[in-house]
Every structure is written in C-alpha cells, then in structure tokens.
C-alpha cells in the first residue's frame, strides 16, 4: 500500500489521558484510535496486525478440531438466571440494556450461558461427542478502571473455545492438546520466550486451571516462575503441598509481574448441570456432558507485544504478525525505480508499505521506526549509483547494501 | 470436513415462533441458531457463507481504494448530541447502557457520529483527501418488530463505508464508482438479476440517494421497476417530474415487493459541519469535507439468497457463496474409495463436506438437498462397479455418471 494514501498518520503525542505504553505507541503510530477509556478503534495498520493474530489462533484451533461459529453479544436474561450470574453483585462487569418492551438484555462478557443451551439442541447421544466449538466475538466488560490500553478493555475481541466431552478422561486428553495449541500460538506470535503456563486454582471441578502469563511490568498479575522448567504458579497455588506436587521448590521460584494472555479452564458439569446438557451413552444411560473453556484475547496479545517488543524509537513487530513484511522507503529522485521495486516485491508475494510521501528523510525514518515493520528497504539516488538498495532490520538495526537483482532472493529467504 | 464431526444437524422443524422462510430454512439446515427474535448465532455452515459474502464485499471495497478499519459498538453520547441524534424520539432504534459511574453509552446502529470526529484527527489538508474508509461492524438496532429472520435483526453485521472528498464533483465521481462496485457485489453473490438500483429521496444535500433493492415477496419495501432499463424508483420519488428527469414513464413501471440489500447516500456536510471536519485547500482556505456513506448487510444478503434461491427441498447456494463446493456422499460399503476421493478433491483445491455418517440414503439425500451445496458427488458400491461416481447439480437437478479418473478435470471446470 502506498503510504501517501494511508489515512492514518503518525503523531508526536498520544492523548493526555492515555497512560499505558502500549496504547501510547499504537496511537502515535496510527494503529488504533481511542474512543474513550478502554474502548479503541482499530485503524488499517492495527487491523492488519489483529487479523494476523486472529488467523494464527484460528489455525491452531482448527488443528485441534475446533469448529468456528459466531454467537451474539445480546444475551437472554433467562439463561443467566439459571446459573445465578445475572445479578450485578455476582457478575460485576455487566453492561445491560433493554428492548422497547422493557425486556432486560445483557451484553456478553463470556458465553458459557449461551453456548450450553445452544449445544443442547445438537447433542443427544454419545455419537455427538466430543465437540469443540469456538468463536472470535466482541465481549463487553464494564470495568471500573481501564488504564492498560488495549490490554484491558471495556469492549474487545476474544477467542473463546468451549469443549464438550463424554467423560473426564477424554476431556483431560483434549485439555492437554489445548495446552500445546496455546503454547504454539504464543510461540508463533513472538511471545514464546516470555510466556509461562501458570498453574492457578481450578474451582469446584478440578484442582488446577491454567493461565498463560507473559512477563511484563505492564501486567496486573504476580506469578512465580521456574525458569528451567518453564512453568509458573500464581499466588492462589503458592502452597508447599501444591509446589511439591508440581515438582517445584519455593527457593527456585522468581516473582514476576505478568499479564494473562490466555486461560484454559476445566468446567466439569458447572454449566451442563443447570442447562441439562446430557447425552445417552452406549448402555442407554443419561450422562452429563463434561465441559472446558479456552480463552485468548487477540487485542490483549497485540498490546502485550507492543509493550514487550518495542524500543525507545517505537514498535518492533515479529514477522508473523507485522502489518507489512517490508517498509519500502523512497528518498529523493528515484521514483521510477522505487515504483518498479514496489511492484516486483508485491509480485514476489510480499506485503509492502511504500513510503512514497514527499517528506524529509529524517521524518520518514522516524515514522518507519515508530511503525516497526520488520524489514526496511531504502532506495535513493545514492543507493542507485551502485544499482543497490539499503536493507535495515528493525529489530537488530543491522544495515546492509544489496544489489537490486539480488534483493528478491534475499528477502524471500528472510521473510517466507 | 467430515459431516460425522460437524456439530450442527438438520432438523425437521424450525422453532414455532419463527415465521420467516429464510430463518426457517437456515435453522432447519443448521446454518444459524435463534437466540431471541431478531438475534441469531451463525453455526459453522452459516459462518462459511457469511464470510464468503463478506470477502466478496471486501474485495470490491478494496478495488475502489477502501481502507478497512474496525470502529466500536460502544458510542460516546457527546458525539450524538452534536448531531441531535441521541434522543430516542429522534433515533428510535437505540439500545443504551451505562458505565459503572452512570455515564450513558449507546450501542451503534450506524457510525457517522464516530467516524467523523475520528477522521478529524487525520484530515487537515487537501493532500489528505480523498479517503474511503470501511468496516464490517456489529450493529445494534432496537427494532419493535423483528419477524423477517436474518433480513431484519436487532444485532447484525454491516459493512459501512464512509467517503471523504474535496468537493462535490470528486464526491460524485466516487459515488458513481461505488454504484458499480455494488452492482458487481450483487452480481457475484447471485442476486444480480433480481437486484435494482432504486432512486430514493436524497435528503438535504442531494436530490437522490440510491437503494439496491432485490425483488422478493419477503421484502418489506415497495418499488417500481423498469425491467428494460434495469432501474427502479421507490414511492418517495414516484412523481411525474422526477420520472421525466430519469427518463422513466409511469405506465412502464411495475410495482414489486423488495428488500433493501444495500444503500448509498450523499451526506454533503451533514456530519462534517457539526464535527468541524474541514481541510485547508491549495489556496489556504478552510473548506468542509464532503461525505458519503455506503451500506450493505451481509447477513441480510444471505437471508435474501435463502428466500430467493431455494426450492421445496431446501437451500440452493450459488457457487460463489456456498459453504462448500462439493457435497460428497458415501452410500453403503465404499468407505475406502470415498476417503480417497475426499482427499483427492481437497488436494485439488476444493472445499468438501463429506457425508461419512452411518445413515440411510434417503436421509442423506434429504439433508443434502436442505443444505444446498451446489454439486453432489455420490459414491456407492453400485457406482464403483463402473469405477464411477454420480454427479448431481443441486440447482438444475441434472444427474450424470462420471468415471473417477475424469472427475477432477470435470469438477475443476465446473467450480474454479
């Protein structure tokens, strides 16, 4: 895309009320726009990153037999009364609204109360199980404080998967698969090194649930990590007997601030009981379906990447989720050759942001650093004297000159 | 995908309170699930259709230089007070909610009041124009009656584009381009023959706006079509002088029921004035930005296709938006060969729903008719005696036997 046509612009300052680093950087670079505290629009560059994160998650959910659907934001009060979660004193993040006739509706902050009765229409027999269903859905959470940029929003997209299994052992098997899928996701997105599967308390139906926590000072959680074993525990399970059980020793654990980028939960029959979500087994007996839920917020993940993978000059996107592969920058009087290279890069299957603007070199470089596309290709009268372009790696700062005929081979090797 | 794993199932009856044909068919075939009147979830088959419609619209919006973003559902009251549209007596479809501190918020039914102040942050000079920005966004409309299935919802996805132009003549030029893009969209989706660009009244800033109306008895609108000229007018503009101007004669116009599947609107300075969305022109003068808006509801389009392109046996999807290209149906003892063909079809780039269920032939055929995938491939012991499969075209009912080695060539020709 030609940058002269891109409607978003970089700006020197973020809004004064924006205190989080991720939102400051993303607003300044033109990725998001703040509508109110905890409510952000995604502009073209930001939406490209968000969609790449969503697609990585989608691929990993499909790989473990997930079936994608879309539930709704508007929620039926009756379903939430069945689980005793309609009352604001019990679920304290409700946004509520009403129909013209006065019927109260909720805006979904999570979807167990919708998916459970829905699945009741399609599960009758053991032959209908297991089933794994997921969506990317806008969630609404009426947070009192929303000061962490896109890491804690009042309106945000969430991937939530729900599993429906025959019994505990087949549930456990899928739960393990989901752990691996989540590990893959954070690895692919570039947060693998800093993300710890964290044991937390499991509620009524199991000893543990698991959070995926990424180490960052911008996080609102405290976890205790074992760097060698690459696992962690949160405060709830920081007890001698549990640490023993997990093979962890207290004196090896390091306290860290972290953000919860994902979580997986054993639900047992917590929702299948009230919604009578049952099946008939091979012997003709009625049994409850065993459920689990599996969440990741793609926007929170994007915010976490912006917090961690950035430097004093701006954002630094991993290749897998960068808005573009290449930032092609034209300096001075080399427009014809730059246009040619732009078209050739696209022909080679690369996504290119082409800075064709009439602006000073310093401004272009500063903007490019701020936007954080992994590879910069600079073309100018000077580089053309050697029939070359300059390559600069955003993450390492490494610079090299390369002859134009060798550019595509080099960039292919790097990017694809 | 193997049908034995698909969680949705066909059902004999739709819910009793569902009176619309589109929702009855789509619910019975397992494409959507009714949550409450005017609120539907999309199941795997339905989401596949919806996403194909969305992608066709996206391609056509990108082709006229649209830049995709995502605004938010939660709306700031202050913006809507500026245009005097906050009051329920003026905009009568509001769903409203509030923050914990009592601040009132709206749920967006349209987004002019959000995009206009947003663009003010990025438009300053004539060099920043024109800009065309669009999104696929969930809209909330508090309809008193919602009885037309997914053709009129309280919560639904809408593509809304907003254009920002230097002056009326460059706006008019883009407006014409958008008409062509809309015509392409409905053509590609399979509604071209029945969809009429319809002149309707234009409000303060122009004589006309344009609706894209598709002829169907399920529609809630009345239009008057000229079949030869392939245009129509609605009641508002059914006046002698206007018909003259459009070169239409009253006695050639035929009254039809129709559904509005899209609309395009000249907004002039209706929104740029209250939000002071201006730019500095080449001569240094401050000028207002000229706006337009361009809507299509992908879900309504899907419902319209279900109404029009269906028969007594079920849905009949056009190839461009079908949930799968091929419905492969295994009968009797031919599992090994069926699995082989399933894999080969996928290898050939085709999307295949494979009915591998242990069910009677009659049930499989009835389900296949109801689901409406364009091409059915039947494999059985009987067809295998001639090393063949049976092909059946869902729309025409045409049946032919084809030898397996010739299948891929034939299907490629048909589908790709």
Image (tube, coloured by chain):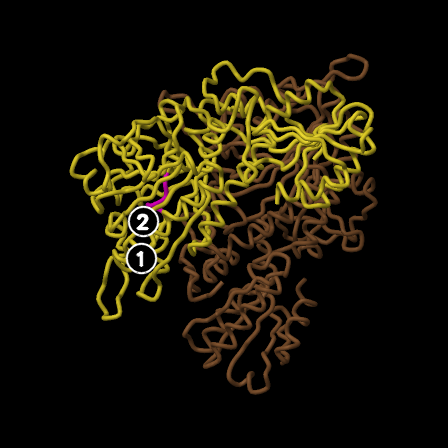
Chain colours: A brown, B yellow
Q: Are marks 1 and 2 in contact (CB under 8 Å)?
A: yes
Measured as percent of width and height from the top left, residue A302 is found at 57, 53
- Viewer-proximal residue, B410 or B376? B410
Q: Is residue A332 above or below residue B264?
A: below
Tag 1 residue: B165
Q: Secondary structure at mark 2?
A: strand
The tag earlier along the polypeptide, 1 or 2, is: 1
Q: On the rendered structure, is A166 left or right of B371?
A: right
Q: Is residue B230 above or below residue A85?
A: below
For the C terminus of chain B, the image quarter is top right
**Is the stretch drawn in magenta largely helix, strand or loop?**
helix
Measured as percent of width and height from the top left, residue A168 is found at 78, 27
Question: Residue B292 has which mark?
Answer: 2
Please state the extent of the stretch shown in magenta in the rendering.
B110-114
Q: On the rendered structure, is B151 left or right of B42?
A: left
- Residue at the limit of the structure toward the bottom, as seen here: A385
Mark 1 surroundings: few (<14), some (14-19) or many (≥20) residues within 10 A: many
Label 2: chain? B
Q: Is residue B111 magenta?
A: yes
Q: On the rendered structure, is A363 left or right of A61?
A: left
- Viewer-proximal residue, B104 or B24? B24
Label 1: chain? B
Residue A203 visible in image: no
- Viewer-proximal residue, A7 or B410? B410
- Residue at the limit of the structure toward the top, as seen here: A284
Quarter of image, res B220: top left
Q: How many marks?
A: 2
Between the C-alphas of marks 1 and 2, the distance is 9 Å
């Amino acid at each position: 895309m030609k940058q002269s046509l891109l409607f978003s612009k970089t700006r020197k300052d973020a809004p004064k009320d924006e205190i989080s680093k991720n939102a400051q950087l993303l607003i300044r670079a033109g990725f998001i726009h703040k509508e109110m505290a905890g409510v952000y629009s995604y502009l073209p560059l930001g939406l490209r990153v968000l969609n790449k994160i969503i697609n990585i998650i989608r691929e990993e959910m499909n790989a473990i037999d997930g079936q994608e659907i879309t539930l709704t934001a508007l929620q039926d009060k009756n379903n939430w009364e069945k689980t005793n979660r309609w009352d604001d004193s019990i679920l304290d993040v409700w946004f509520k609204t009403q129909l013209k006739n006065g019927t109260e509706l909720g805006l979904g902050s999570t979807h167990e109360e919708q998916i459970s009765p829905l699945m009741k229409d399609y599960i009758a027999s053991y032959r209908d199980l297991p089933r794994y269903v997921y969506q990317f859905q806008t969630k609404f959470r009426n947070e009192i404080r929303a000061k962490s940029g896109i890491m804690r929003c009042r309106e945000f997209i969430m991937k939530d998967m729900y599993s429906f299994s025959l019994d505990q052992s087949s549930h456990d098997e899928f739960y393990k698969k989901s752990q691996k899928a989540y590990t893959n996701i954070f690895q692919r997105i570039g947060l693998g090194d800093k993300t710890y599967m964290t044991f937390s308390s499991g509620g009524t139906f199991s000893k543990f649930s698991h959070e995926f926590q990424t180490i960052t000072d911008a996080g609102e959680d405290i976890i205790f990590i074992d760097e060698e074993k690459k696992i962690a525990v949160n405060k709830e399970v920081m007890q001698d007997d549990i640490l023993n059980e997990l093979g962890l020793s207290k004196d090896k654990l390091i306290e860290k601030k972290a953000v919860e980028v994902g979580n997986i939960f054993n639900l047992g029959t917590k929702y299948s009981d009230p919604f009578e979500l049952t099946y008939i087994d091979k012997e003709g007996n009625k049994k409850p379906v065993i459920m689990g839920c599996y969440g990741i917020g793609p926007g929170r993940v994007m915010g976490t990447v912006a917090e961690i993978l950035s430097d004093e000059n701006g954002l630094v996107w991993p290749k897998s989720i960068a808005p573009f592969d290449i930032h092609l920058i034209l300096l001075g009087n080399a427009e014809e050759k730059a246009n040619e290279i732009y078209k050739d890069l696209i022909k080679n299957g690369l996504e290119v942001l082409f800075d064709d603007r009439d602006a000073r070199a310093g401004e272009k470089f500063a903007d490019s650093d701020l936007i954080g596309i992994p590879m910069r290709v600079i073309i100018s009268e000077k580089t053309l004297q050697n029939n070359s372009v300059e390559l600069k790696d955003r993450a390492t700062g490494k610079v090299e000159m390369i002859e134009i005929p060798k550019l595509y081979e080099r960039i292919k090797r790097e990017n694809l």
